[in-house]
Image (tube, helix red, strand yellow):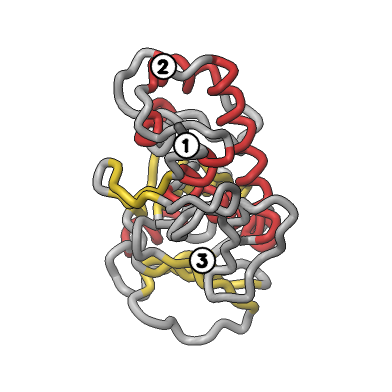
């Protein structure tokens, strides 16, 4: 599943090619035909990210809500557009570009109450200017759930995914199994600040980079990480422990994260 930096990058990249333009909408696959018809011919006035969710706003109360899930994908191309590739749920066409969406987990139209409900159930997004870290700390400080699970819970703190979770806690020397209510406010503030800094780097380079001073890898996913999916700790050379948190793989150095 894409981590939060990927969705913010999509919002950044799609805004110049959609915002301020009258757009046409269609559903080549057919599964979103009614929704596409409601949006067809409207002017896009904003594309924004909320954690792992993408919201398109128009010159009407309607909002297009997209969540890629595990298999969703965006394909952007300049016009004239090619024939749809694969099962395209939604095709958005502006004067200059075409954006296809394949396989999203969620593709729906929301009215204002639905948008408000979405913002209420999603935790503060570390990359948004309007994020309230106090709201996240209030949830974490009252919970016995492990901090490794809490900071990846999108209802607590939006945008942090599996790799960032492992890397942030290692960088700060915080053991993932510690209960949330054992995390002090200075420790939480450090988690928030590091998450914000690393995700901003991810947006800039369109890659997860948690190694200080590193550039994107030339490998397929362009990741540069310290301990995620690694065998040895780059700091103390101890063996990295692989385990699961809520069904997701995680990693820790028992020496650096006592």
Tell me which residue sits at (24%, 47%) in the image.
247
Q: Residues within 10 Å of mark 1 (few under 14, many from 20)?
A: many
Point out the frontmost of discs 1 and 2: 2
Q: Earlier in the sequence, mark 3 or mark 1?
A: 3
Q: Which residue is mark 1?
A: 158
Q: Residues within 10 Å of mark 3 (few under 14, many from 20)?
A: some
Whole-angstrom CA distance, mark 2 to mark 3, is: 47 Å
Residue 156 place in picture, x, y as percent: 41, 28
Q: Is residue 245 rendered to the left or right of residue 251?
A: left
Q: Earlier in the sequence, mark 1 or mark 2?
A: 1
Tell me which residue sits at (70%, 55%) in the image.
204
Residue 228 place in picture, x, y as percent: 47, 55
Who is closer to the viewer here, 11 or 246? 246
Q: Are marks 2 and 3 in contact (CB under 8 Å)?
A: no
Q: Is residue 179 visible?
A: yes
Quadrant of image for the C terminus: top left
């Amino acid at each position: 599943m894409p981590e939060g930096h990927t969705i913010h990058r999509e919002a950044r990249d799609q805004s110049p090619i959609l915002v301020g333009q009258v757009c046409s909408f269609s559903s080549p696959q057919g599964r979103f035909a009614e929704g596409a018809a409601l949006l067809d011919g409207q002017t896009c006035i904003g594309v924004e990210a909320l954690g792992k969710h993408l919201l398109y706003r128009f010159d009407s109360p309607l909002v297009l809500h997209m969540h890629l899930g595990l298999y969703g994908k965006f394909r952007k191309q300049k016009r004239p557009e090619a024939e749809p590739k694969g099962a395209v749920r939604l095709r958005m066409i502006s004067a200059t570009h075409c954006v296809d969406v394949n396989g999203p987990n969620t593709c729906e139209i929301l009215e204002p109450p639905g948008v408000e409900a979405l913002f209420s159930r999603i935790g503060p997004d570390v990359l948004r200017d309007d994020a309230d870290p106090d709201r996240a700390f209030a949830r974490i400080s009252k919970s016995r759930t492990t901090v490794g699970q809490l900071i990846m819970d999108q209802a607590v703190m939006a945008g942090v995914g599996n790799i960032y979770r492992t890397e942030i806690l290692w960088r700060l020397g915080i053991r993932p199994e510690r209960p949330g209510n054992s995390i002090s406010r200075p420790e939480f503030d450090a988690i928030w600040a590091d998450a914000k800094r690393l995700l901003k780097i991810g947006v800039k380079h369109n890659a997860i980079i948690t190694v200080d001073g590193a550039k994107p890898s030339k490998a397929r996913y362009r990741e540069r990480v310290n301990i995620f999916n690694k065998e040895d700790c780059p700091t103390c050379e101890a063996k990295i422990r692989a385990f699961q948190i809520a069904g997701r793989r995680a990693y820790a150095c028992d020496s650096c994260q006592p």
